[in-house]
Image: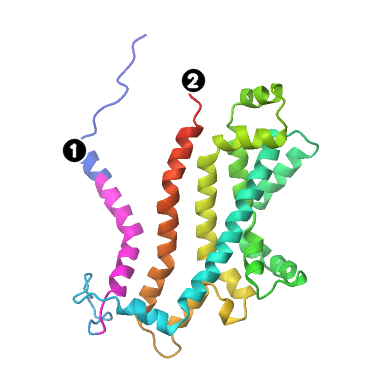
Amino acid sequence: MSSGSTGRNPSATEKAVRYLLLVLVLLLTIGPFLWQLSTSLKGPGEDVWSRTPGFLPEDPTFANYLQVADTIPVWTYAANSLIVAAVAVAGNVVGATLAGFALARLRFRGARLALGLFVATLVLPGEVTIVSQYVTVRSLGLTDTLLGVALPGAIAMLNVLLMYTAFRAVPPELDAAALVDGANVRQRLVHVGLPSVRGMLSVVVIFTFIGAWDDFLWPLIVLNDPSRYTLTVGIQYLDGTFSANPRLIAAGTMIAFLPIVAVFAVLQRFFFRGVEEGAIKG
């Protein structure tokens, strides 16, 4: 049976369209970040309100970053955000891993019902449950505390499903071999399951940290004491009631963005290494 051509080289027009789309996506994603970075480095003598503002700073300076630290307690806010993110990451790493493993590898009554409930919660937007979350946190006496901010995101349903999918991808023959060797549930999780899902676990860590670090609405609702504000909430003080310095706001945005870059830069190599080590070679 003859087969036609399985592929062809794209024409020059197709290549041009592809590169044009890539450049457009790059401008939409990287452009706002570069503009904020440029604004944060502009000196007080440069007009950022002009009709055609310059992209490159004429006289680059880091004074705006120092002024941010003088205007708000940025390091206190950053420490608060780090505590919230650490609690959220720890909760998701432990909770989502255990729940995902139980749903994927253990047999118990009501497993399908529990999985269905996890999937059903993804349909609800966060704004629908925010009132019930606040009532729960208040009943626990955790309002105006960093633990109250971190608690609702300590186990995300999406992360549970991600870990469930990752554990389901582990060949059942490995579990069967471990059972034959007399391994219990904890040993199967530690020695069989976790080495194969480290890539997905890195994804959970990265996105949990980003979500907890960037969250604005929930900390704004729970926290009342300015000394406990997270960084995203505290940055709003850079926008004055009667005047606003866009250079300071841009510098504060960059300060809030740098930890995300650092976490992703550190963990992305573990993500790819985990995927490679978890691959089952035939």
Residue 11 appears in the figure: yes
- Mark-to-mark CA distance, 1 and 2: 39 Å
**Residue at 58%, 65% in the rendered image:** 84
Q: Nearer the viewer, residue 216 or 226?
A: 226
- Residue occupied by mark 1: 12
- Residue occupied by mark 2: 282
Which residue extends farthest right? 109
First in sequence, mark 1 or 2: give its number: 1
Q: Write the start and end of the magenta stretch as one range.
A: 19-44
Q: Left or right? Give the position of 274 relative to 10.
A: right
Q: Nearer the viewer, residue 92 or 3?
A: 92
Crowding around mark 1 (Cα neighbors within 10 Å: few <14, some 14 to 19, many 20+) is few
Q: Secondary structure at mark 1?
A: helix
Q: Nearer the viewer, residue 24 or 55?
A: 55
Magenta highlight on residue 22 = yes
**Residue at 50%, 65% in the rendered image:** 214
Q: Which mark is residue 146?
A: none
Location of residue 77 in the rendering, given as x and y in whole percent from the top left corner: 51, 74
Helix, strand or loop for the magenta stretch, by majority: helix
The quadrant holding residue 66 is: bottom left
Give the image's coloring scheme: rainbow
Residue 239 appears in the figure: no
Location of residue 161 in the rendering, given as x and y in whole percent from the top left corner: 62, 44
Q: Amino acid at mark 2?
A: Gly
The quadrant holding residue 115 is: top right
Q: Secondary structure at mark 2?
A: loop
**Residue at 32%, 22% in the rendered image:** 6
The N terminus appears in which quarter of the rendering?
top left
Name the front one of labels 1 and 2. 2
Q: Is residue 54 above or below residue 214?
A: below
Q: Amino acid at mark 1?
A: Ala
Q: Is residue 73 above or below residue 146?
A: below
